[in-house]
Amino acid sequence: MKGQWRLAVAICAVAANVAGCGAPDLAAMRPTVHKPAVLVEIVGSPPFAPSASELGAAGATAVEVVHVSWNAWRSEAEKELARRRLTGLMLVCDDASAVAPGVDELASSNPSVRFLVVSDWPAPLAESSNVAEIAQDPVGIAYSIGALCGDWMVAVAPGSTSGAVYSGVPSLVYVPQGASAAEQKAFFAGLYQTNGNVRVVALPQQTAPSLSSYGYAVELGVIGGNVSPAEIQTLRSVTPNWGCFGTLTGSGCAIAPGHLDPSEVLRGFQALASPVSWQPGEHLVLDLSSVALDDKRLPASVLTAWAALQVRAESEASRANAAFASLPANVRSNLENTFHLS
């Protein structure tokens, strides 16, 4: 198929036995042993996609790796499923939401085949014994980025007890555009756990007076979701320092969501290839690659903080909703009145 390239790896444990002279030992071949055949579709260009050789060494008797476009993955899957030889099908992609409806339909029509979606961003999939998903934890990432932003604001104000670089109120300009309420609450829970002095303000309109005229010392800007180019330009005019969480890409953020670690893909593949190890359902993970840090723009203390935070970030994020509810009343009132976050 045009626009695709394919690699097939066959791992035959009996190759060494049949390389010499004489008839092969059929008993040694163990014809009744489970021999998985797995199709791996790499959809688009996810940065964590494994190679065919890595997957082949991970344990399947036969694995076929196909690189496909977003609008071609389903036709490729249907073609291979029609041959009735697959035991598993794995989709590796940036965002699971684009493939979720098709996966649910194919899994329902092929109950004997195990389906696994591995992505940076999860999407709801059918609760079925033959469907599983591995993805980054968006709430864990949002919490982590919030905590690191708080550390960043402390680091840029050495010797200041208030966290302000200049005279005035230490401030973070927040631009919410599409991040879920759970992600936003997790972000603010992390932010205020590391820096309780922050004042969060909205991005001013282009015709509005500057924030400095109100006495705000803007130290950092943060985007929650995906904003327009015009909003990014306005944010740049307010502060050179900014981070983001949610699905925003290509924004120039110094702190941003990262990507799934390739080891998670191989671990999921091994489970897919083994009926014993298979676990259906959603599996969210958080590791060192889940947050991308620009080491040329960030203080060294922030980089060090992430190495320590990553160990406990998932457990902290699981309590983020309660942590948000326990923020000071004036903080919660400001977030509700300004950003409708309660």
Image (cartoon, rainbow, N blue to C red):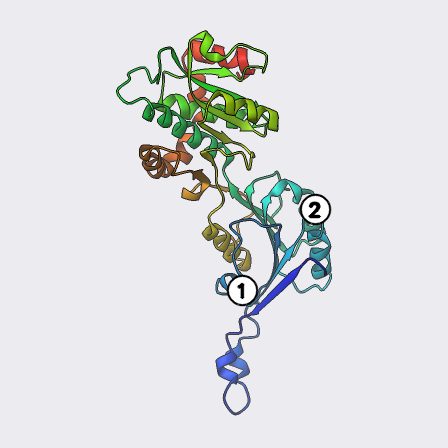
At mark 1, the secondary structure is: loop
Left/right placement of residue 192 relative to residue 245 reads left
For the point 28% across and 16% down, which residue is it? Answer: 161
Q: Nearer the viewer, residue 13 or 28?
A: 13
Task: Return the residue at label 1.
Answer: 60
Where's residue 287, x and y in %?
Answer: 42, 43
Gap in angstroms between the C-alphas marked 2 and 1: 24 Å
Q: Amino acid at mark 1?
A: Ala
Left/right placement of residue 208 relative to residue 156 reads right
* Image quarter (top left, top right, bottom left or bottom right) of the N terminus: bottom right
When the figure is inspected, residue 289 is found, relative to residue 329, above or below; the finding is below
Residue 80 sits in which quadrant?
A: bottom right
Where's residue 213, x and y in %?
Answer: 46, 8
Q: Residues within 10 Å of mark 2 (few under 14, many from 20)?
A: some
Left/right placement of residue 188 relative to residue 301 reads right
When the figure is inspected, residue 43 is found, relative to residue 333, above or below; the finding is below
When the figure is inspected, residue 172 is found, relative to residue 98, above or below; the finding is above
Task: Return the residue at label 2.
Answer: 102
At mark 2, the secondary structure is: helix
Counting labels gives 2
Residue 31's tag is: none
For the point 54% across and 59% down, which residue is it? Answer: 273
Labels 2 and 1: the sequence-earlier one: 1
For the point 38% across and 33% down, which residue is it? Answer: 298
